[in-house]
C-alpha cells in the first residue's frame, strides 16, 4: 500500500467550517473530532452555546452542582445527533503515569492527544460533589459522519482542519473560538472567500 493512500485520521483535530457553509448547524462552527477512522467520524461543536447553562442542566437531572465556577458555563449544541443526550469533553482525570487500568467513569472514550469524552452520568455526579475533571465542556448532541462522508466534505472544501489545541476549547471565550482556531493555521476569517475560484 502506498504511503499516500493511508487512511486519513483527524482524531484530536479541529474542523473549521469554511465561510460558504450554509448549514446553520455548522455555519462558523469549530468541531472537535473525538474519533475518526475509515468507518466515519464523531465530534462535538465547541462554539455553539445552547440557551441553558450547567446550573439549569444539573437542576433538570436533579443534581446540585457543587462547583459554582461551572454554573454559568453554557451547555453546548454538540451537533444534530442525539440532542437529548449529554456528552462531556474533559481533561484526563489522571496523568498517564498514575492512570488506572479501568476508566474512572462507566463510559469514557480516551482520545489520542490527551482529552477524554464521557457519556455516562457518573461524571456529572462527580462534578456535583465538587470533584471530577477540572476543565469540562458539556454538550447535548454530537456530530457524526458516515464512512467516507467527512473525506468528501473535505474534498469539497467545506472544512479546514488543524491539530486541536485544548486551550481553544477550555480557555478561549466562545465568541473568539472560531477566529482562534483559524489562527492556528495562520489565517483570519476575512481572508477566506466563500466563493471558490475567485481572486
Image: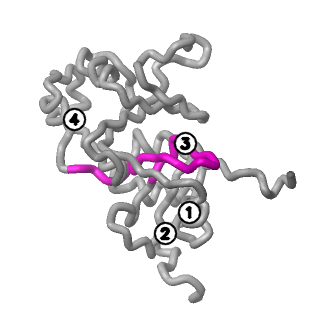
Marks 1,2: beta carbons within 8 A: yes
Q: Name the residue that disc number 4 marks.
A: 54
Q: Position of residue 33 (x, y in %)?
A: 51, 46
Q: Earlier in the sequence, mark 3 or mark 4?
A: 3
Residue 4: horizontal and vertical position, in percent? 81, 57
Distance between the alpha carbons at the discs numbered 4 and 2: 30 Å
The image shows residue 18, relative to residue 75, as above or below, that is below
From the image, tell me which residue sits under label 3: 35
**Quarter of the view holding residue 90:** top left
Q: CA distance from mark 3 to mark 4?
A: 25 Å
> CA gap, disc 3 to disc 1?
17 Å
Measure how far apart labels 2 and 3 are at the Cα level.
Answer: 21 Å
Mark 2 crowdedness (10 Å alpha carbons): few <14, some 14-19, many ≥20? many
Which residues lie in the magenta part?
A: 31-50
Of helix, strand and loop, which one carries label 4? Answer: helix
Do the numbered discs 2 and 3 sit on residues whose CB atoms are within 8 Å? no
Residue under label 2: 18
* Left or right: where 179 falls relative to 131: right
Extreme bottom residue here?
Answer: 198
- Rounded to the nearest angstrom, the CA distance separating label 1 from label 2 is 7 Å
Amino acid at each position: 500500500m502506498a504511503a499516500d493512500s493511508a487512511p486519513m485520521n483527524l482524531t484530536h483535530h479541529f474542523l473549521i467550517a469554511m465561510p460558504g457553509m450554509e448549514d446553520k448547524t455548522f455555519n462558523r462552527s469549530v468541531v472537535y473530532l473525538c474519533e475518526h477512522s475509515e468507518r466515519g467520524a464523531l465530534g462535538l461543536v465547541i462554539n455553539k452555546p445552547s440557551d441553558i447553562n450547567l446550573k439549569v442542566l444539573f437542576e433538570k437531572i436533579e443534581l446540585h452542582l457543587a462547583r459554582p465556577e461551572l454554573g454559568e458555563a453554557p451547555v453546548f449544541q454538540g451537533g444534530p445527533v442525539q440532542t437529548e443526550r449529554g456528552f462531556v469533553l474533559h481533561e484526563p482525570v489522571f496523568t498517564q503515569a498514575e492512570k488506572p487500568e479501568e476508566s474512572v467513569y462507566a463510559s469514557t472514550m480516551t482520545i489520542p492527544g490527551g482529552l477524554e469524552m464521557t457519556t455516562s452520568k457518573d461524571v456529572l455526579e462527580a462534578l456535583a460533589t465538587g470533584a471530577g475533571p477540572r476543565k469540562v465542556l458539556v454538550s447535548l448532541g454530537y456530530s457524526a459522519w458516515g464512512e467516507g462522508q467527512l473525506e468528501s466534505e473535505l474534498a469539497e472544501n467545506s472544512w479546514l482542519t488543524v491539530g486541536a489545541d485544548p486551550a481553544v476549547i477550555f480557555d478561549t471565550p466562545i465568541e473568539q473560538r472560531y477566529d482562534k482556531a483559524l489562527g492556528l493555521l495562520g489565517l483570519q476569517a476575512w481572508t477566506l472567500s466563500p466563493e471558490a475560484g475567485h481572486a
